[in-house]
Amino acid sequence: MAESFFSMLKNERVYRTAYATKSQARSDVIRYIEGFYNSRRRHSALGYRRPNEVHYGYQQPALAA
């Protein structure tokens, strides 16, 4: 799964953008991961659910106990 993630990150973001500084590249990658990849993108390994849905689904039973 990690290889798939890094491949997707490179193809969808890094290779399509020219960064002026390392700091700019770091900020853009973080925005991509937190803003799109983790919140909106559906994943086949998660039953085509969004990662945030899975994460909060695990937390709900623990919070109720």
Image: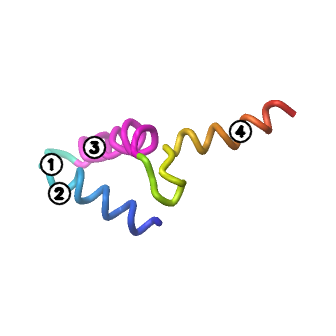
Which kind of residue does numbered mark 2 sit on? Tyr
- In three-dimensional space, the C-alpha distance between marks 4 and 1, rounded to whole angstroms, equals 36 Å
Mark 3: few/some/many CA within 10 Å (<14, 14-19, 20+): few
Residue 17 is labelled as 1
Instruction: Say what amino acid the circle numbered 4 marks.
Output: Gln
Q: Picture coordinates of residue 11 (x, y %)?
A: 23, 59
Determine the image quadrant of residue 9: bottom left
On the rendered structure, is 6 left or right of 46? Answer: left
Secondary structure, mark 4, is helix
Quote the CA–CA distance across marks 4 and 2: 35 Å
- Residue under label 2: 15
Residue furthest front as drawn: 47
Specify start and end residues of the magenta stretch as a single range.
22-41
Please rate how many residues cluster around mark 4, counting C-alpha atoms within 10 Å: few if below 14, some from 14 to 19, many from 20: few
Q: Which of marks 2 and 3 is nearer the N terminus?
A: 2
For marks 1 and 3, give the CA distance: 14 Å
Name the residue that disc number 4 marks.
59
- Tell me residue 27's x, y (percent): 31, 40
